[in-house]
Amino acid sequence: MTATPPAPRTPTAPAPRYDLPEPDASTRPYWDAAAEGHLLLRRCRACDRAHHYPREFCPHCWSEDAVWERASGRATLYTWSVVHRNDLPPFGTRVPYVAAVVDLAEGPRMMTEVVECEESALAIGMELRVTFREEEGCEAVAVFRP
């Protein structure tokens, strides 16, 4: 009886990532500004309201006449949850982390993450500033810190 050699190992594909945005032509200005450390919003010229996340129409009046505007980067904490378990890559390596909703100074609410802050220091209404999570080969993502 002859032994069959083991099958050659094939390189494993990297694990899928669930934290990366999928920019398109309409959101490219947002991601380009984030790479430079700036948070952009869209402001509707018809109703003069700012909105976030970036999209091609105003969610308040449905106008397609919206322009890009640089946000101040200031926000207040509206609500949060501390995530202790998340099995989707790469979140499992980041636990615990603070998933949050913030009120931007310009008006819109934004889903984000609070970083560089102890859980015990979190408080509704606390002042936050934007910063960006950056990884080589990935889009910069807006997160907030005290």
Image (tube, helix red, strand yellow):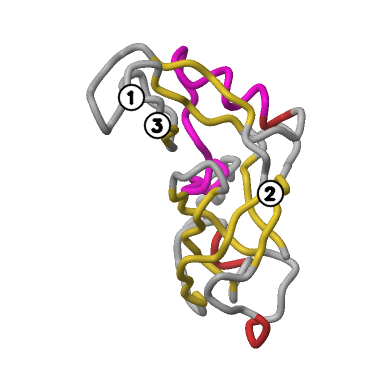
Identify the residue at image location x=70%, y=80%.
118
Residue ranking furthest to the bottom: 120
For numbered disc 3, what is the local secondary structure? loop
Which range of residues does the magenta coloring cover? 13-33
Query: On the picture, is 103 further left or further right than 116?
Result: left
Determine which quarter of the picture holds residue 54.
top left
Q: Is residue 3 left or right of residue 108?
A: right
Q: CA distance from mark 2 to mark 3?
A: 21 Å
- Of the residues tagged 1 and 2, which is closer to the observer? 1
Q: Please say if 95 is above or below 102.
A: below
Closer to the observer: label 2 or label 3? 3
From the viewer's side, name the closer residue of 58 and 92: 58
Residue indicated by mark 2: 130
Q: Quadrant of residue 120?
A: bottom right
- Looking at the rendering, in which quadrant would you find the C terminus? bottom right
Q: Position of residue 19 (x, y in %)?
A: 51, 48
Label located before the other in sequence (2 or 3): 3
Three-letter code for the amino acid on which mark 3 is drawn: Arg
Of 146 and 107, which appears nearest the observer?
Answer: 107
- 1 or 2: tag closer to the N-terminus: 1
Residue beneath the point at 47% across and 48% down: 18
Label 1: few (<14), some (14–19) or many (≥20) C-alpha neighbours in 10 Å: some
Q: CA distance from mark 1 to mark 3?
A: 6 Å
Residues at marks 1 and 2, CA–CA distance in whole angstroms: 26 Å
**Marks 2,3: beta carbons within 8 A:** no
Amino acid type, residue under disc 2 in the picture: Val
Tag of residue 95: none
* Residue under pointer 3: 49
What secondary structure is marked by label 2?
strand
What amino acid is at disc 1?
Answer: Cys
Q: Which residue is mark 1?
A: 47
